[in-house]
Amino acid sequence: MSEHHFEFLVIGSGAAGLTSALTLSKKGRVLLVSKGAFGDGSSLYAQGGICVSREADEVQSHIEDTLAAGAEHNDRSAVSVMVESSAEAIDWLEHQGVRFDREPDGAYSQGLEAAHSRPRILHATDFTGRSIQVALVSQARRTPGVTIWDEATALDLIVRDGQCFGAYVLRGGIAHRCFADATVLATGGLGQVYRWTTNPAVSSGDGIALGMRAGAEVADLEFIQFHPTALRADSSPAFLISEAVRGAGAYIVNQSGQRFLFDVDPRGELAPRDIVARAIYDELPVSEVYIDCRHLGLTPLLKRFPNIYQGALDRGFNLATDLVPVTPAAHYSCGGLKVDLDGSTSIAGLFACGEVARTGVHGANRLASNSLLEAVVFARSLMKKPLPKTSRPVSTSCPEYCKATPERFAGLKRRLQHLMWEKVGIVRAEHELRAARAQIEDWSSGITGAGWINEDIAELRNMLLVSAAITQAALNRRVSLGSHFLVTSPRVDATYCGHVETQLAGADENVAFV
Ligand code: FAD
Ligand code: SIN
């Protein structure tokens, strides 16, 4: 096993990982490892934009909207820090080369999304995430103090006596022991544990699992945000139709053409995400649900949403002339590794930022376009206190690498995704959560202590652990709050989303894992 020593190890190359690597490179050498292609992750696909509030009244209303969306379950000091730092974060991004859209008079073009009381969302057309990632990736490549390893999977943290010393990283079939004075988990979200998600393949909850195996505290994992308007098609990740499209005036209608969201909330299409997602979920068994942009006109659509227009067209729908079928899909994890305001987890030497971290900013339900902001703000303010001097452990061990994944594990990931969608999804019931927990425990027992590892098994092991943790957190919270919604008896809908594949979930009960 080869050994590497850096001052900082950053795991993940989304907005959080890149921002922290660039910031920390001022203090020491950084190794930046990333599971997929360099710069891949949810950040790259962000559409709507990033919030900013500069004047005192804007700051105040942004704080209030964030708390209201989060069902007041938020950590108020974290919310204030994020909102009060938003202007600085935007200035920093612009300094890195990000360009946000502006009006002809030079003022920022500011978008509106659900649960925002005023337009405050900066964007670069409808692919804000791509603009941010292109700029940050190029800065990281130009920064001599940052060493980049892509296609490199962090398997486990190196932890002794409550202190983190780095991580084991699998790259090119070789496990590397990467030591660092401080390790930053910036591994993003966990949407991949659900059958329908907007999240890319790399979002499998790895950082939460790595942290949990090392004994780090987690919080709020029951609060999974489901985006209401993913394009309803056979593939997952599902293509997102940004909330900004509803912010620009699009309607949600059923097959009778009725704007049924007003029956559940006076804000209609711009009610908070959890409300809209549940209303669509409830409507789907009786009717198709569509986003209707036809009245917005081709030219404005092309100007403001060129990529969404093209993405829908590639999937057979013309936003200017067609109703586009939509479905909710797992989108964002409000919970994660519990951190304080300088990103410290409960393990010395281990930090977290971005979606993997639970700063307390989002409470029980995230306000749209607050997550890129959270990622940048808190990645820039990591490690305010000096790091204590520690001596590295001499002997550490990592499981053997095993190239081929044994046949008995085939299909388990898909079964887990179905289980989570059906039993730990948008609407939850205690007996379903208990059944899911038992099934996940059963599946997990076959994978622990295997003594060998590869990328697929590492991911599966993480997904099982994170799924178990979400399920347990959902069981622990006995009343509905924000995106955690309990009923006594949810409908069982084997044909949900109209995909025959969903039937797999029922057939799974008899499939032995080992
Ligand atoms: P990510 O950008 O997901 O990056 C995670 C990184 O970790 C990746 O590089 C991945 O390869 C790496 N990684 C994961 N596991 C490992 C491992 N084991 N070893 C090594 N590397 C690993 N938020 C907004 O604020 N505004 C928006 O408009 C918006 N739109 C969105 C649209 C979509 C389609 C999606 C999916 C999300 C959107 N969000 C939006 C949410 C937001 O994009 C994410 O919360 C945010 O980008 C997360 O950034 P991150 O850096 O924490 O994670
Ligand atoms: C969207 O553009 O609808 C996503 C925004 C977000 O998730 O914050």
Image (cartoon, rainbow, N blue to C red):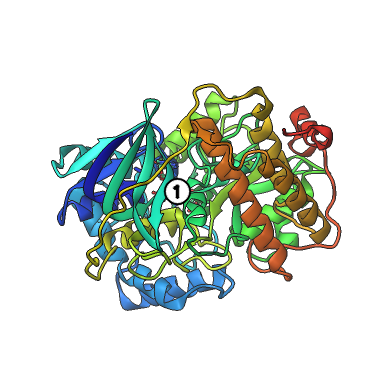
Quarter occupied by residue 142: top left
Q: Residues within 10 Å of mark 1 (few under 14, many from 20)?
A: many
Front in this rendered view, residue 447 or 320:
447
Residue sitting at x 82%, y 43%:
285
In the rendered image, the vertical position of residue 491 relative to residue 324, given as above or below: below
Quarter of the picture holding the C terminus: top right
Question: Can residue 369 be seen at all in this image of the molecule?
Answer: no
Residue 332, placed above or below residue 201: below
Q: Is residue 18 above or below residue 148?
A: below
Residue 86, how many percent across, how many down? 32, 64
Q: Is residue 48 visible?
A: yes
Instruction: Give amino acid for label 1.
Output: Gly
- What residue would you read off at disc 1? 188
Q: Is mark 1 within 8 Å of ligand 1?
A: yes
Q: Residue at x 59, y 29 (%)?
A: 317
Q: Quadrant where the N terminus lies?
A: top left
Query: x, y (%) of residue 177?
Result: 33, 41
State the image quarter where residue 322 is shown: top right
Which secondary structure lies at badge 1? loop
